[in-house]
Each structure stands twice: as structure tokens, then as C-alpha cells.
Amino acid sequence: MKIKRHSAAFAVLAAGALVLAGCGSDQNAPQGGGNPALGGVQVDCGTKPVSAEGSSAQKNAMDVFARDYGLKCQGQQLNYTKSGSGKGVAAFTAGQIDFGGSDSPLSEEKGEVAKAAERCQGNPAWNLPMVFGPVAISYNLPGVTDLTLNAGVIGKIYQGQIKKWDDPAIKALNPNAQLPAKDIVPFFRSDESGTTENFQKYLTTATGGAWTGKGKQFQGGAGVGQGRDGSDQVAQSVKATEGSITYVEWSFPKNLGLGIAKIDSGAGPVELTTANVGKAIENAEIKGEGNDLRVNLDSIYGNKAPGVYPIVLNTYEIVCSKGYDAETAKAVKAFLTVAANANPQELEKAGYVPLPESFKSKVLTAVNAIS
């Protein structure tokens, strides 16, 4: 099955728990507040606060969702703790929170699917992809404001096979650019990172296996590049270093005014924009069945169609299909309904891409089926 959806780019955010509440009690009136899209959305807010934990990659999106939730469901609140995907899944399967945030869907191999079903009173848990965000290839090269790269060149830079900005392979992609004979200084994440994991998956898929590194720990060429802890540090290092390059969530280079490379997957250079990221997701495949919406990211990373920006991450909200008490079910459904209709401008400011209508309808069908 193929479905449309936009992606959303991930920023790394402040630690700790997010608690956002509204005030008042009119729960079913269309309290759109600062998000006009919520004006016509009807939800039954319930009476319980919503608790969640997990992925740091989606925390800034949760901030946006929580603000809208406080407006729509006055008196209700979201408690979200940024602890990492693994802890989010563990807290969910242990029944400590209402839903978990994860960079990856539940794993059959790790026993997470079975544990989640037990937590959900014998009912399956669903993986709902609520947050999408592009990863930028960001650079600092004075005098070069328009740069095109492809997966092969990026991989060779990080393998140490391309070392200068005026390398013939880069010049071939940028025939009109004045590329200096300057050393390339690659930066990468030294900590374990879902961004790194997906960046390496992209390189593997888009290079047809020429890139062999995988996992959350970066695996470039021996002695190539410099590691930094966290997205903020790699972005700041690029800002401070002429000739540098990194991979990082979209919000960081946007906020720092850094260069962002166009990506050429074979049909010409593609700029990182909301529309072009959306095109990457429009034909992505779903591997799950029914309302379990597991995204096959390889179908995005390998998309060579014109106008597609292919380096995209997504995170999931892991929920019980059934098994909640009545008030918890109402609150979870209300929050996720609001999240699916989140303020597009605020999401984009945070470095994410809003759900397109066609994909939103799939997500909302699943949300409405929770009981």
C-alpha cells in the first residue's frame, strides 16, 4: 500500500519533562486559539492528563502539539519526558505511560511487540508515524551559496576518498560554482543518534550498498572527520569552521544561517523545502497492516523522482489499539487528533514538516479506532 504524507525534521531539545496545560472546562467547543486548523476539529477531551515519554527527536514537535492541545482541551495537559526511544518503549510496555515516542517501530525480535500486547490487555499496539523531519547536509563554504551534492559524493567525503572542495566529483555537480581548493572538514555525531542511524541508512540505500556503515554510532572512514556530541554541537562546529560539512536536523542550520546543500538523486538538484520533502513521502510504502502504520524508509531514501528531497526521518507514537480505561482512551485520542492537525507554521519553525492531508486521514482513522 502507498500513502501520502509529509515529513517532519528533527531538532534536539532541552532535557526534562514537558508539562503544558490549558485552563477552563469547555472541552468540546472548537477552541482553535492560535491554530485556525483546529477550529473545526471536534474531540472528546476526557478528564485525565496524558502521559508520554521517549524520543528526543520529536520533543520540539511535542511542544507544538502540547500548546495546541492546551488550547483545544482547556484544563487538560500533556506530560512528555524526553528520555530516548528505548526508555519510551520500556515505559510504555511497563504500563507507566499512555503512549511511547520512538524513532523506530516496535521490534518483534526484541520482544517489544509481545510486551506491548500484554500491556494493552492482550490487544496489539499500533505504531503511528506522527512526526516527520528532514535532515540537512549543512556546510560552511564562504562564497558558495548554491551547492549540490549526491549520496555517492557525501559517502566518499565521510570515507575520506574526497578530501578537497574542488574535487572533480563535486565540480561535476556544480559546474558554475567557484569551489576553492580547500580541505573538507567533516563533522559527525560522536554520541549514539537516531539521526546518524537514518543518515547511514540513507547512504546505504542511495549508494546501492557502497556505504556499509550502520547503526546509531557513526561508522565513517578511519580517522576521517571530527565527532561532536549532539546536534547543537555539530551545527555550531560547522558555523565556526570554514570548509566544514555535517548532517543535522533541519532546524539547526536554518537557525544558524548555514548553507544547506541541494541533493541530486539522479533527476537534478533538489532544495530542502517543505514541499520537496513532502514529495519524498508521498509514495513511501507502509509495511504495517491495518492501522499499524510502519513506514518503509527505504522507499523514501531510494526515491529518484524529480523534485524529491529524500533524507527524511520519522518518529512514532506507540499506542494501544484497545485496553485503555475509558477516560484515558478519550484523552489519548484527543491529544493525537490535535497533534495530527498541529499548526503547520509552528512545526516548520521547529524544523518539522506537517502531515499532508492524504496521510493525515490514515493517521486519524487509526486514532479514531483506539478504544
Image (cartoon, helix red, strand yellow):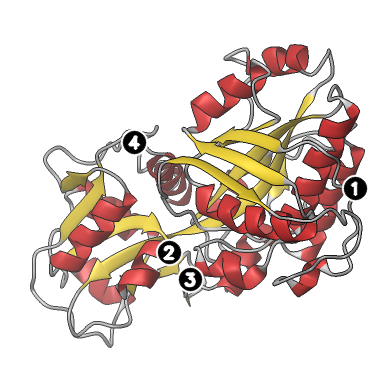
| Residue visible at 61% across and 39% down in the picture | 79
Q: Report how far apart the C-alphas of labels 1 and 4 lie in the structure.
A: 47 Å
Q: Is residue 146 above or below residue 317?
A: below
Residue highlighted by disc 3: 272
Kindly identify the amino acid type of the residue bearing the numbered disc 1: Asp
| Callouts 1 and 2 close, C-beta under 8 Å | no
Instruction: Give residue 41's quadrant in the image.
Output: bottom right
Label 3: how many residues lie within 10 Å, few (<14), some (14-19) or many (20+)? many
Query: If you read the primary sequence from the N terminus, does the residue marked by circle 1 or circle 4 appear first?
Result: 1
Q: Nearer the viewer, mark 1 or mark 2?
A: 1
Q: Which residue is mark 2?
A: 251
The residue shown at (60%, 58%) is: 64
Q: Taking 179 as reference, is 52 left or right?
A: right
Q: Which residue is mark 1?
A: 44
**Mark 1 and mark 2: span between their CA atoms?**
33 Å
The answer to which of marks 1 and 3 sits earlier in the sequence is 1
Q: Tell me the kind of residue under disc 3.
A: Leu
Measure the alpha-carbon separation of dots 4 and 2: 25 Å
> Dividing the image into 4 quarters, which one contains the C terminus?
top right
| Residue 26, percent from left and from top | 88, 57
Q: Between disc 4 and disc 3, whose residue precedes? A: 4
Which residue is found at the position 48% from the left and 71% from the top?
Answer: 272
Instruction: Look at the image and tell me whether residue 290 can be seen.
Output: no
The disc, 3 or 2, on the residue closer to the chain's N-terminal end is 2
Q: Nearer the viewer, residue 73 or 330?
A: 73
Q: Residue 17: x percent and y percent?
A: 51, 39
Front position among marks 3 and 2: 2
**Along the line of sight, which residue is nearer the eye, 168 or 357?**
357
Q: Secondary structure under badge 2?
A: helix
